[in-house]
Each structure stands twice: as structure tokens, then as C-alpha cells.
Image (tube, rainbow, N blue to C red):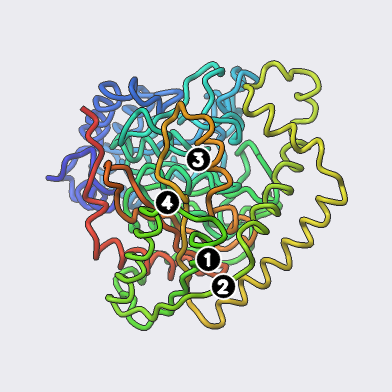
Amino acid sequence: MTDLAWMSVAEAAGLLRAKKLSPVEYAKALIARIERHDAKFSAFLRFTPGIALEDAKRAEAEIARGEWRGPFHGVPYGLKDIVDYAGLPTTAHSKILKDNVASADAPVTRTLRAAGGVFMGKLSTHEFAIGGPSFDLPWPPARNPWNREHFCGGSSSGSGAATAAGFLPAAIGTDTGGSVRNPASMCGITGMKATYGAVSRRGVFPLAFSLDHVGSMTRTVRDNAMMLDLIAGHDPADPGSANRATGGYTADLERGVKGVRVGVIRHFYASDVRADPEVASAIEAAAAKLAELGAEVREVRTAPLAEYLACNRTILTSEAFAIHENWMRERPGDYGALARERIMAGAFVRAADYVNATRLRRKLTDAFHGLFTGIDVAVTASSMDPPCRIDDTTAIESTYGRQARAVFNVTGGPALAVPAGFTKSGLPLSMQIVGKPWSEALVYRVAHAYEQATAWVERHPPLD
């Protein structure tokens, strides 16, 4: 049997359903691993082994009675601590909300609970999903399992760290300017920002209403597709939710990429921003691998990266300040320095700039989606640099401008970060596979073919 820490959701589901693996045994193994190692990585803000064992015992009894709820029945998961779990604090990693107890489950939480998932706890985030990594908050920032002296990305930092460390096979994150895909990239896992409106955001503390997404974070592509199958769906109480059919994301995983038209957005990382050579080489090698597998690969061009980033930044900071304005006036000292600085930037954005950014967003989106008349998916960089040291504030600040993730919060289409190798020093490298709206199944298909043709997901961080 695969080491329980590294078992995929798909593997675990087969064993759990066949009663060859006990949900209680599974939960106890991961609880012991978290207790042994998380003091070094701070992935959890609130570890809940008691709830986990209750969930696991319930799942075990149900499975014994033949009451199978699906592939997440008995599988451990965690939630970024801006997502509500009834009866537990939703702190957003901030002193502002340290006593904020959720009165109800977010729909994504309710779905995972109804599926028989085993809840392991609330996971670290950057403060309010924008300010971090910060050392002036009530709780420490999460660290990278590949090297604890390095940044693990954000703002879904604990979700990325916990999944990469083998504490959980799956976690929920959120993504407004890349906050699922950044920790996925830095931690060497898979993170999906699905099409805007695919997953309900109700019960999730907002950062920017028109850019926010809830996303799935796993170690494998198949697990990610399975998770999105579960959490996607229309929520009429979320004004951004799309009323259209979702699901079927695993159906075509084994079809391969022969004949699939892949566009490489090279100018993002080769000229708009010059990526670290190891990052650029990894993406070029991935494109070559897809061509070797039968894809039709060619270079494509869109608007300069800087236009997308400026558009995202203007909308995000404006909307974030609107959410935080009262607290900023009444309790500015209760924010960490990074969150206060980043949120306050929105106070200086003129209404005309915000309106013009929303108009530019439409133009950029239409032009980008026009690329898909000639291609099926695109690949490009995620982060332009490998993980930097967590105590290098200058390097960390530069990472927010040296990335190509915010592009796809602007366009709203699906974007998946997948492992693409390792640096010479053993830190993860990553790339993005992106598609037109509602093409998640095809994005997953391409990613799965690449994953199966490489061995990146078979490497795990040495925690001891």
C-alpha cells in the first residue's frame, strides 16, 4: 500500500470503498504526521483532530453499511481560513477577525461535509488573502515544505504547504490574483482557478468581488478534476455564480493530447518579464514534451503582460479597499503592516481609473479569448522565479509583479498550475495550462497527459 501521506484521492477512494483502508486509520496517520511536522511549517491555523476522528468514525460506519457517498467519502481535507466552517472561527489570519465564529458552513464546506470528507482544520493564509507573509500577526506565516527557509506562496499558503507536505491529499484555496496557483507553483502541487462563476464564493471572506474564485488544490491532476467535479455548481445566492452545467472533468483524462492545438505564450516570460532561466527552461521543456506526445505546439501572442497586471491591480485594490474601508478608519493598527499597506493603496485609485480598468478588462478578455479560434489550450509561466527565502522581503515583494497568474483572473477562464520540474537546488518549478471559459475538462486532459509523461509528482519533500 502507498504511504498514506502520499496517497492520492483516487487511490484512497478505491481502497476505502473496497474496505481495504479504514477512514479512521487514514485520519490517524495524517494526524500523527501533522503533529510531528507542522510546528516547522505552520500550515494550520486551527488543527481539528477531534473533528477529524469524529468524521472518520462516521465515514467508517457508513461505508461498513454500504452507504457510499462518493470518492471523497473518508478522505481528509482542509479549508483556507477565509472559508466558513460552522462553529469555528474564520479569522482570515487577522487580529480583526480572531473571534469571528462562523454561524453556517460555506456552500463549498457543506458540499465536502456532505460528501463524507474528513475535516482536518483551517489553514494559514495571508492576512485577508492579501497581506503576507507577515510576522506581525497573531499567527506565524506558513513555510515551504521543500525548504522551510523559503516562501510557500500565497495567499492560500497553508493549503499549498499542507497538501505538498503530505498532511492532506486535498485542500480548498481562493484565487483573486493567483492565490491558488502561487502556492501550488511554489509547493510543487496542482492548483485550479476554474472559470469565474463555476464555484460558489458564498461564505468566503471576499477580497475583490469581481475577481474572486474558490479553487481546488491537490497533488495530482486527477484528484483536482475529481475535487472540481464535487465543488462546482450554480449557487443562486452568489451573484457571481454561473447558471450552467458543470462536471465531467475526469471523463477525458486518458484521451491524450494527439492533435490538440497548444499555444505557447512565450512573450510573457521571455520578453515582457524575463523569467529565471530555470523557470523558462522548464516551460520550454514542457512544451517540447507535449509536442512529443502528439500535440500541435506553436507560439501565440496576446497583449503585453503589464497591461493585464495593471488592470488586475487597479480593480483588486479598489474593491478590496471598499470592503475594508470602515475597519481601515476605525482599527488600522489591528492590521499587519503588509495588509494595511496593500489595502490602503485602493484608497488612492480614482473612480475614473477603476471604470477605465473595467472597460480595459473587457477588451483584454475578448482579445485573449479570440486566441482560441486557432488553439485549444495555452501554456505559459506561473511564477517567473523559483521560491525565494521567506525572510527576503525585497524578493517576496517582487514576486507579485513577476508572475502571469493575474492575467486569468482578468479574463476569467480556467487556469491550472502544474509541477514542471525542480531547480538544481531542489525547489519546485511550475507552469500554467489555460483555456477558454468552461474548457476545464480539456485543460485537465492536457495536464494529465503531461503529468503521466513526467515523474514530477512522484517526488516529495523530505520533511525529516
- What residue did someone put label 3 on? 109
Task: Report how far apart the C-alphas of labels 3 and 1 lie in the structure.
Answer: 39 Å
Question: Residue 189: x percent and y percent?
Answer: 36, 48
| Picture layout, residue 151 above or below residue 40 | below
Which element type, helix, strand or loop, lies under badge 1? helix
Q: Are marks 1 and 2 in contact (CB under 8 Å)?
A: yes
The quarter of the displayed image where residue 119 is located: top left
Q: Residues within 10 Å of mark 4 (few under 14, many from 20)?
A: some
Amino acid on which the number 2 mark rests in the picture: Arg
Amino acid on which the number 4 mark rests in the picture: Asp
The quarter of the displayed image where residue 146 is located: top left
- Mark nearer the N terminus (3 vs 1): 3
Residue 301 numbered mark, or none: 2
Task: Report how far apart the C-alphas of labels 4 and 3 lie in the structure.
Answer: 38 Å
Q: Viewer-proximal residue, 18 or 454?
A: 454
Q: Viewer-proximal residue, 403 or 121?
A: 403
Residue 93 numbered mark, or none: none
Task: Report how far apart the C-alphas of labels 3 and 2 lie in the structure.
Answer: 39 Å
Which element type, helix, strand or loop, lies under badge 2? loop
- What residue did someone put label 1 on? 267
Amino acid on which the number 3 mark rests in the picture: Thr
Amino acid on which the number 1 mark rests in the picture: His
- What residue did someone put label 4 on? 276
